[in-house]
Image (tube, rainbow, N blue to C red):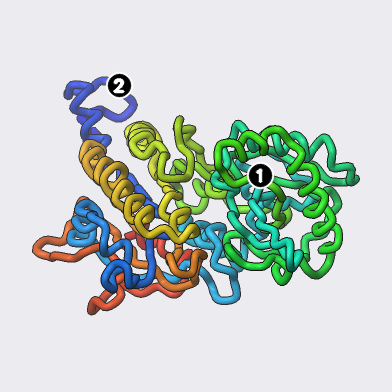
Amino acid sequence: MDEAGREDGNSFCFLPCLFCYKITAHTVMKYIVLIGDGMADKPLRELGGRTPLQAALTPNMDKLASRGLCGMVKTIPNGFDPGSDVANMSVLGYDPAVYYSGRAPLEAASMGVELSEDDVAYRCNLVSLRYDKQSTSAYMEDYSAGHIETRYSRGLIDALSEYMREPGISFHPGISYRHLMIWHHGESEARCTPPHDITGKNIKDHLPSGPGSDFLKLLMRKSVDILQSQEYNWKRFEEGKNPANSIWLWGQGRKPRLPAFSEKYGLKGAMVSAVDLTKGLAICAGMDVLDVPGVTGYLDTNYEGKADYALKALAGDTDFVYIHVEAPDEAGHMGKYLDKIQAIEDFDNRVVGRVMFGARSLGDHRILLMPDHPTPIEAKTHTSDPVPFVIYDSTAPIEGSKVSYDEEISRMDDIMKLESGHKLLDYLIKG
C-alpha cells in the first residue's frame, strides 16, 4: 500500500481525492527563481551613500534574506563580457565556457527564426543618434530610441527589409527596439559593442571592427537614410520622442546547442520573461515559455501577471519556474536612479511578495532570489561584480535572523561564496 492508501495494482483509495491531491502536492518540491535584472549597484551620492537596492522599500526580499541562506555569486566567468546572456545562462545552470555562442541566436530561438549552420544572427537595435554638424560626429543619444513602441518599430523594420538591397541578409521584427538581422553564410568574428555601453559617447571608436566589419558598417550607414525617410519617425518627432534614425548591430553568434533542462535536472521547467534573450535560453533548453499578456521589459510591465502565471504553472505539472523582470536593468542603463528604485519596489511588492504568498499553497518549495548581474547607475552598463543571492527553503527556514537584502550581504560572516555561477542552481535543486 502506498502513502495515499492505494493498494499496488489497484485504483482503490481509502482517502478522499482532495486529500490525496494535498499529499501529492506537499511531497513534491517546487523551485522558483526570481531575477531582478541588474538590481545590484554601487553607492550613490544622491542617495546619501546608499545603493538603489538599499534605498528601496523591500520588505518581502528582506524577509527571504532573514529566513534563507545568503551568499554572493559570480555569474560572469573571467574572460566574458558582462552581458545578460552570459549571466542568465550561468544562473540557469549552463557553463558559458561550454555552451555560449552569442546573444542574438538565443533571441532568434525566441522569435521562431530558424538558423542554418552557416547563418549568423545579429541583434539589431533601433537607436537614436545625435549628430554634431560642426564636427560631423555622431553620438549615441539613446540605445532604445526612447523605448520605441512596437507599433512603430515593426514598420521601420519592414522598411529596412524592403529597401535594404544587400544580398544575404534578412531583418526580423521583435519587440520595441529589439530586433534581429540574419547574415546568411555570414561572418561572426567581428568585434561589436553593445549600444547601451556607449550612451552619450562618440560612436566613431565603437563601430564594428575586424572580419566582416566593413559590411556591417555599410548596413548601418544605409539604415540612416532609410529610417529618416519613414513616416513612423515623423510621428515620433511630432510627439517629442527620440527618433529611431539608425540601426546598431551587435551580439552576433551561430545556432546554440544546450542539453535539455529536463535531462540535466530531472525537472519540467518554465520561463516567465518579457525579453527574447531569456525566452530564447528557455527554448534552447527545452523549457516552456509562459506567454503573459502585457509584459514589456520596462516599468509598465505586467508584474502581477508574471507571478500569477508562474504560480499557476507550478500548481500543475511544472516543477521549476524562472521569473525574469527586466525593469531595474533598463533604469540602470538610462542612469535613472529613481526609476530603478521604483522598479525594485515594484518587483518586491508585485512579484516577490505575490509569489511568496502564493507558494504556500504549493507545499514544499525553494526560492532563489538574485540579480543576474549589476547595472550601476553611474556606469549605465553591466559589470562583472558578484551579486547577492538568497536561497529560501520552506522545509528548513532560518529563525531569529534579521538581514536586509542588498549588497551589504557581501560583508556578512560565513556566507556562501561561489566563483562559478553555473553551479548555483545545483545548490538550489540538490540542496
Quadrant of res 305: top left
x and y, in percent, of residue 286 in the image = 56, 43
Amino acid at circle 2: Ser
Residue at the disc numbered 1: 179
Q: Residue at x 39, y 36 (%)?
A: 302
Please indicate whether residue 225 sits to the left or right of residue 3 in the image: right
Please indicate whether residue 169 sits to the left or right of residue 49 in the image: right
Say which element carries label 2: loop
Quadrant of res 173: top right
Say which element carries label 1: strand
Residue at the disc numbered 2: 11
Looking at marks 2 and 1 on the same chain, the residue that comes earlier in the sequence is marked by: 2
Q: Quadrant of the C terminus?
A: bottom left
> In this orientation, which residue lies closer to the viewer: 273 or 298?
298
Q: Residue at x 55, y 47 (%)?
A: 146
Q: How far is disc 2 from disc 1 in space, using C-alphas?
A: 53 Å
Q: Quadrant of the N terminus?
A: top left
Give the answer, above or below, for where 28 lies relative to 118.
above
